[in-house]
Image (tube, grey):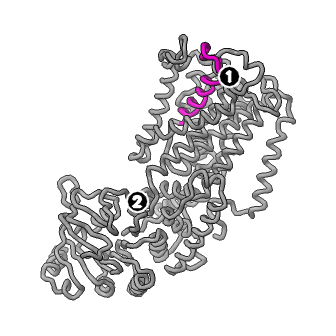
Amino acid sequence: MKSRIGRPAIPPWANRALAAAVIAVAIIFPFFFTEAAGWVDDMTLALAYVVMGLGLNVVVGYAGLLDLGYVAFFAIGALATGWFMSGFFADANVHVLVGEFTKNLPGIHFNFLIVLVFAGALCAVAGIIIGLPTLRLRGDYIAIVTLAFGEIIRVFVIQGDEINLPFVGGDAHLTAGRQGINPIDKIDLPFIDQFTSLNLRPWYWTALALVLLVLFVNIRLRDSRLGRAWIALREDEVAAASMGVPLVKTKLMAYAVGATFGGVSGAFLGSYLNTVNADQFQFGFSIFILAMIILGGLGSVWGVVVGSLALSLINTRLIPDVLNDVPSKIGLDFNLVDVNYGIFGFLLVLMMILRPEGLIPERRRQIELHEDVDESLVEVTHA
Amino acid sequence: MSDAILQADRMSKIFGGLVAVNDVTFDIPRRSIISIIGPNGAGKTTFFNMLTGLYKPSTGRLTFDGADITRRRPDQITKAGVARTFQNIRLFSTMTAVENVMVGEHSRMRAGIVGSILRMPWVRSEEKNVEAKAREMLDFVGVRKSQHDALATNLSYGDQRRVEIARALASDPKLLLLDEPTAGMNPNESARLTDFMIRLRDETGLTILLIEHDMKVVMGVSERITVFDHGEKIAEGDPASVRANPRVIEAYLGKQEAA
């Protein structure tokens, strides 16, 4: 075994050439379609999910902390846009680095990049807060605590319309509950076309840029002191602590980094979807993202990218557009869209049987899982 | 003793109603090789776990190199200069031998999250040095170069033991705790390990504390032996006097009769 673990066995130049080619294709992709084509829309959404997948990958894939409340960071990131990129606080009048049109609107309006950084920072703090009670817990118990945290945030968003914020002035509340906050300001960046619902290309490129940024950070951290500490922690907490890895700090770092990416994606989606309402933040969303990274390969950045794209496109394109009327054609009276979660579940079961390490597995996991298989076979043959 | 690198003062560990370690006072002179022996269940490993911070002592005080480390976390104690191996090997199984040893160097590294993301020049050179040192360490403990990049789980048993020692040494310890390092080794390998421990002490000035069942190793390498039974220290002294001590003989023979 000559190649370093965690990297594909192909030479590095080939790897780089492949990555460059994929990125180039990704950049010119929208030119193959009209400006508001459904494909561009679907891909933009998929890329935003890739960002979330990569964030969750840090927590679950690298550090081995099973987080079932990841939707919380989508919610918090999106809420940041609701607060600071809309007319929600109608009595406040704050405008920072926004375009001509937005300047005249009531409410608080910050430039998207500022909100993006703020959403990331806010989620990092939230990530640490969710991390703190799980520090002494292991495995399944972490899953339960994080699941509850996700639900708390959702209920908080629903009920937030009853919480008054006296210092903003007027009749301001924390959230708009089920009604939702909309419209949200469109992203407004210099040197790029207008971000409108009629021209989705700038949205797509922004999402792509976020993916590349998050991908870069993911890879850099994986191959660093911190990345090694995460994997050591995942493998054996006691040994890791005894080798000088500070458990608390290392775990909280994983939660914070993962949450930041979730917040970044949440902020983008807030503006892209043009609404922030409580129904977006269902528990199922956490599972949706988790399913993406399991499908792709836990801990493997390229696996996560592929898994997220695949599941997202299955959700927005394959099921509703391509296969939706299949049941009615064979005489069954339901739409495939209604059972989409059932389909995802089926895909996961299929995956666990055929290829439990994911589509593009992390080398470590592959060895781990396949050794288990060997051992069980040995037991079977001895029995 | 004034020149003790580690002093345990009246340490006890109580689990519920069970007194695992009872009122043990113990010190380790600098640059010595000391052994703890005793029948199974005597509290040796529990005592080890207290020395490395995995268990908090119920009572007592622990001083290392002049500083009170009684309440410190395991990683802080490692940073202060105590490293250990485990009775049943605890390598990070899906990491390579080199990566395992690099984790051992964690507490001596500075790279933080921002530095790692930007991969600053100093972070890059730190990574390089850490990897070079890890390979050096593996050479030093006798792991063949062809095995450096093999996954820990695929290494031979002897190599796994060696990698664990290399990983412990990578944190630049002043005191090395070895929990039954020769378990599962043949007499030949045990003898080699004995020589290695002496060489380690003489070349690097390390202090070594050993838990060991192999009496040949214990008698051959230790300057002092401490005997535990039922959580208490029942004897302490040079190998000859411990061997002749009636309480020690009783503790061991009683065990044999029962078996």
At x 46%, y 28%, the residue is A152
Q: Are marks 1 and 2 on the same chain?
A: no
Q: Position of residue A59 (x, y in %)?
A: 54, 46
Question: Amino acid under label 1?
Answer: His
Q: Quadrant of residue A323?
A: top right
Instruction: Report in which chain the residue with disc 2 lies.
Output: B
Q: Is residue A330 visible?
A: yes
Q: Foreground residue, A121 or A162?
A: A121
Q: Position of residue A35 (x, y in %)?
A: 84, 28
Instruction: Report in which chain the residue with disc 1 lies.
Output: A
Q: CA distance from mark 1 to mark 2?
A: 48 Å
Label 1: how many Cα within 10 Å (few below 14, some 14–19, many 20+): some
Q: What kind of element bears circle 2?
A: helix
How many numbered circles are shown? 2
Magenta segment range? Answer: A70-94
Q: What kind of element bears circle 1?
A: strand
The C terminus of chain B lies in quadrant = bottom left
Foreground mark, 1 or 2, reads 1
Name the mark on residue A95.
1
Label 2: how many Cα within 10 Å (few below 14, some 14–19, many 20+): many
For label 2, the residue is: B76
Mark 1–mark 2 CB contact (< 8 Å): no
Horizontal side of A300 relative to A205 (left or right) equals: left
